[in-house]
Image (tube, rainbow, N blue to C red):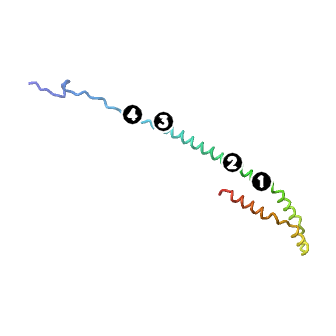
Amino acid sequence: MENLNTNQNPVNAMPQMPEETPKPSSIGPLIGIIIVILVIVLGGLYFWGQRVEKNADESMATKEGAMSEGSDTADTSIELLETQGSSDEITDIEKDLDSTDLENLDQELELIESELDTIDL
């Protein structure tokens, strides 16, 4: 009798499939895309910050221009205060007080208060 071994019989042998090798993951392009997106976002934030700063500078310049229009009267008031006498006689002090213009003091304080209210802290 013939000894039949099923392992040696080509008819009964199952063909072996080659093992599939795993495909390498494509993480490199994904990281590149993420970096490009981050650069675009950071660039946008930078330009947005520059625009906000420019607008703030322009608004401050506008406010300073408005203040300088009213500063002519402030300059004359300051000049009057500086030209007051240095005498300590009561009559000279009374003359200096009478010549001091305090009528626009409230308007100047209101202007200062409105400027402080507009400053963002």
- Label 4 close to label 1 by CB (< 8 Å): no
Is 84 in front, or is 29?
Answer: 84
Q: x, y (%) of residue 73?
A: 84, 59
Q: Earlier in the sequence, mark 3 or mark 1?
A: 3
Q: Amino acid at mark 1?
A: Ala
State which mark lies toward you, 4 or 2: 2
Q: Amino acid at mark 4?
A: Lys
Q: Residue tagged by mark 4?
A: 23
Label 4: state its secondary structure.
loop
Q: Name, please, the residue furthest toward the bottom.
A: 90
Q: Residue tagged by mark 2?
A: 55
- Label 3 close to label 4 by CB (< 8 Å): no
Label 1: state its secondary structure.
helix
Marks 4 and 1 sit apart, C-alpha to C-alpha, by 70 Å
State which mark lies toward you, 2 or 1: 1
Q: Earlier in the sequence, mark 2 or mark 1?
A: 2
Q: Quadrant of the C terminus?
A: bottom right
Q: Residue tagged by mark 1?
A: 66
Q: Amino acid at mark 3?
A: Pro
Label 2: state its secondary structure.
helix
Judged left or right of residue 30, residue 61 is right
Q: Earlier in the sequence, mark 4 or mark 2?
A: 4
